[in-house]
Image (tube, helix red, strand yellow):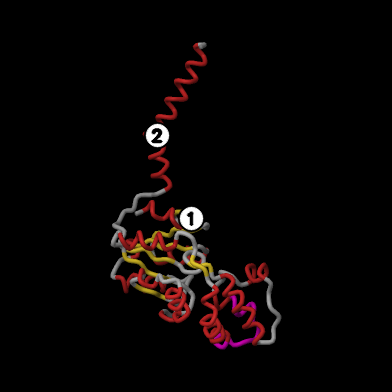
């Protein structure tokens, strides 16, 4: 074996050992920043984080459009024009010249009948169970209305994991305002900087940062971004 080849093998082995004993640790620290305060609670968004409710809300949206004698949207148009937007903004844009409160009443009535169309997302139960077992408080902070949110939690048999459920019915200003997150912190008797908020939209990030929480973005921007909900467990 030539000296050159031997040197290459030695250097490669050294770099591999460096990565195992030092590089990997530094990489993990960079991805998972150390918290300055003790973690006391994790707050979760609902739709898109724990629950796949897209089909249910698409149906509700089109049924509401039909109620007001408007044509429905296909899924692509619904995703682009309505899904994940601030509720009042979405309603004003997609239901012109209609009373926003009347539209909300239709939403409330219809979603209560279609919560069974939702699906529990992968890793959701495992993550909730793990967080609960670590004695960390758990809250739900969502822009879904209270009654359908509770019905959906019960349907998927995960209501027992949550110490508090905060919806637009509990605050004057829902997300992207910080009010729901601050309300959850108040109910849980924790400070915002002792909390992680997990969301999947820009509005979740805005609300979390305005409240002073550490925001984990699921497939979106955050103080830390993750691609799977189970990646959250590396922070615990």
Q: Is residue 213 magenta?
A: no
Q: Residues within 10 Å of mark 2 (few under 14, many from 20)?
A: few
Q: Position of residue 4 (x, y in %)?
A: 51, 14
Q: Earlier in the sequence, mark 1 or mark 2?
A: 2
- Circle 1 crowding by C-alpha within 10 Å: few under 14, some 14–19, many from 20: some
Q: Which residue is mark 1?
A: 228
Q: Position of residue 40 (x, y in %)?
A: 30, 62
Residue 16: quadrant of the picture: top left
Residue 98 lies left or right of residue 163; in this view the side is: right
Q: Is residue 97 magenta?
A: yes
Q: Which residues are magenta?
A: 90-102
Q: Secondary structure at mark 1?
A: loop
Res 15 quadrant in image: top left
Judged from the image, the secondary structure of the residue bearing numbered disc 2 is helix
The total of numbered circles placed on residues is 2
As displayed, is residue 29 above or below residue 165? above
Res 173 visible:
no
Q: Which mark is residue 20?
A: 2
Q: Is the C terminus in the top left, top right, bottom left or bottom right quadrant?
A: bottom left
> Alpha carbon of mark 1 to alpha carbon of mark 2: how far?
24 Å
Residue under the point 51% across and 12% down: 1
- Residue 180, how many percent across, how many down? 41, 73
């Amino acid at each position: 074996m030539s000296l050159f080849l031997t040197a290459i093998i030695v250097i490669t082995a050294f770099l591999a050992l460096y990565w195992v004993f030092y590089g990997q640790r530094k990489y993990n620290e960079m991805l998972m920043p150390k918290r300055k305060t003790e973690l006391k609670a994790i707050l979760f968004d609902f739709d898109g984080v724990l629950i796949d409710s897209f089909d249910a809300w698409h149906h509700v949206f089109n049924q509401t459009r039909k109620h007001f004698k408007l044509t429905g949207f296909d899924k692509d148009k619904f995703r682009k024009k309505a899904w994940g937007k601030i509720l009042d903004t979405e309603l004003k844009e997609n239901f012109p010249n209609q009373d926003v409160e009347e539209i909300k009443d239709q939403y409330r009535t219809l979603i209560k009948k279609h919560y069974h169309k939702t699906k529990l997302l992968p890793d959701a139960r495992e993550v909730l169970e793990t967080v609960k077992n670590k004695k960390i408080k758990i809250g739900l902070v969502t822009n879904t209305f209270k009654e359908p949110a509770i019905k959906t939690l019960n349907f998927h048999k995960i209501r027992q994991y949550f110490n508090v459920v905060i919806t637009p019915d509990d605050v004057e200003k829902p997300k992207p305002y910080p009010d729901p997150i601050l309300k959850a912190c108040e109910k849980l008797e924790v400070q915002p900087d002792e909390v992680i908020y997990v969301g999947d939209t820009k509005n979740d990030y805005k609300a979390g940062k305005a409240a002073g929480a550490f925001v984990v973005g699921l497939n979106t921007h955050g103080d830390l971004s993750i691609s799977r909900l189970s990646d959250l467990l590396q922070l615990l």
